[in-house]
Image (cartoon, grey):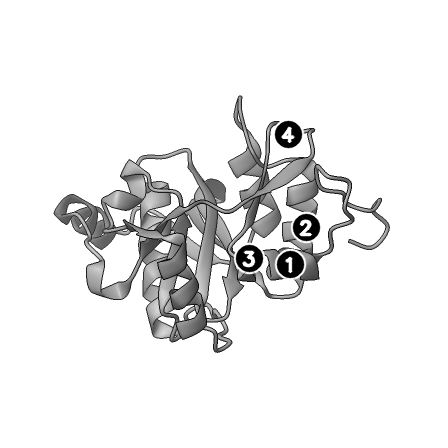
Amino acid sequence: MTGRAVVLDGDGTPITPELVLEAYRRRCFPMADSRHGRFHWYRPQVRAVLSWDRITVPRSLRKVAAKQPYRITMDRAFERVIAACADRSETWICRDIEALYLALHQRSQAHSVEAWDGDELVGGLYGLVLGGVFCGESMFHRRSDASKLCVLHLLERLQACGFGLLDCQQQSAHMGRFGAYEISDDAYAELLAQYSAERRLLASA
């Protein structure tokens, strides 16, 4: 974040990438009301997560994946992915959140998965690493099944790299199809403690 103005949250507190990670350890995440507004911190009492024993992949998606309609990459276009996730009529990804996550990405603490149709970016997702937990933030798609295939690739990489959990934050029909389920805040705290050992999310060779 060199050269940028100090990032302030909605209470006027200066926020650094380190404070973002500390907030996540305390089970909080940032959300803004608009693209140009300030963000506030939220800690839901019910959390959506996905553990490897509960993963389900729809048969139709397996068939699509087998055809390899898109080229899937990791960390090739983080800045473009987060910008695309924010590019909608209503968004919680304000400019300051974007700046903080770009700084985290530069420190290899935030990652993206991309789907490409030729040279065109047609889908993607991003999130950050917290020990052995990957905290998913947002995703987008411009072609059918593009974001779903990014999720599938992420799940494969998380398991291969020794991660224990995907934090989906809030339940959605999209993640519910993959087996995401809801737990209490206390249960989530226990999982964060269980998977506290640091992990590195590496792209496949």
Viewer-nearest of labels 1 and 3? 3
Q: Are marks 3 and 4 in contact (CB under 8 Å)?
A: no
| Mark pair 3, 4: CA separation | 21 Å
Which one is earlier in the sequence, the residue at label 2 or at label 4?
4
**Which x, y percent locates residue 102?**
66, 52
Q: Residues within 10 Å of mark 2 (few under 14, many from 20)?
A: many
Does residue 107 lie above or below 43 as drawn?
below
Residue named by callout 3? 24
Viewer-nearest of labels 3 and 4? 3
| Mark pair 2, 4: CA separation | 14 Å
Residue in the picture at 51% in, 65% down: 130
- From the viewer's side, name the closer residue of 8 and 136: 8
> Looking at the picture, which amino acid does disc 3 mark?
Tyr
> Looking at the picture, which amino acid does disc 2 mark?
Leu
Q: Secondary structure at mark 2?
A: helix
Q: Which mark is residue 100?
A: 2
Which picture quadrant has residue 161?
Answer: bottom left
Q: Secondary structure at mark 1?
A: helix
Question: From the viewer's perspective, is 30 left or right of 174?
Answer: right
The reply to whether residue 157 is visible in this rendering is no
Residue in the picture at 38% in, 75% down: 162
Q: Residues within 10 Å of mark 4 (few under 14, many from 20)?
A: many
Residue named by callout 4? 35
Residue named by callout 1? 104
Q: Are marks 1 and 2 in contact (CB under 8 Å)?
A: yes
**Which x, y percent locates residue 47?**
38, 49
| Mark pair 1, 3: CA separation | 13 Å
Residue in the picture at 78% in, 49% down: 14
Q: Secondary structure at mark 4?
A: loop
**Which x, y percent locates residue 50?**
31, 56
Q: Residues within 10 Å of mark 1 (few under 14, many from 20)?
A: many
Find the residue positioned furthest to the top.
89
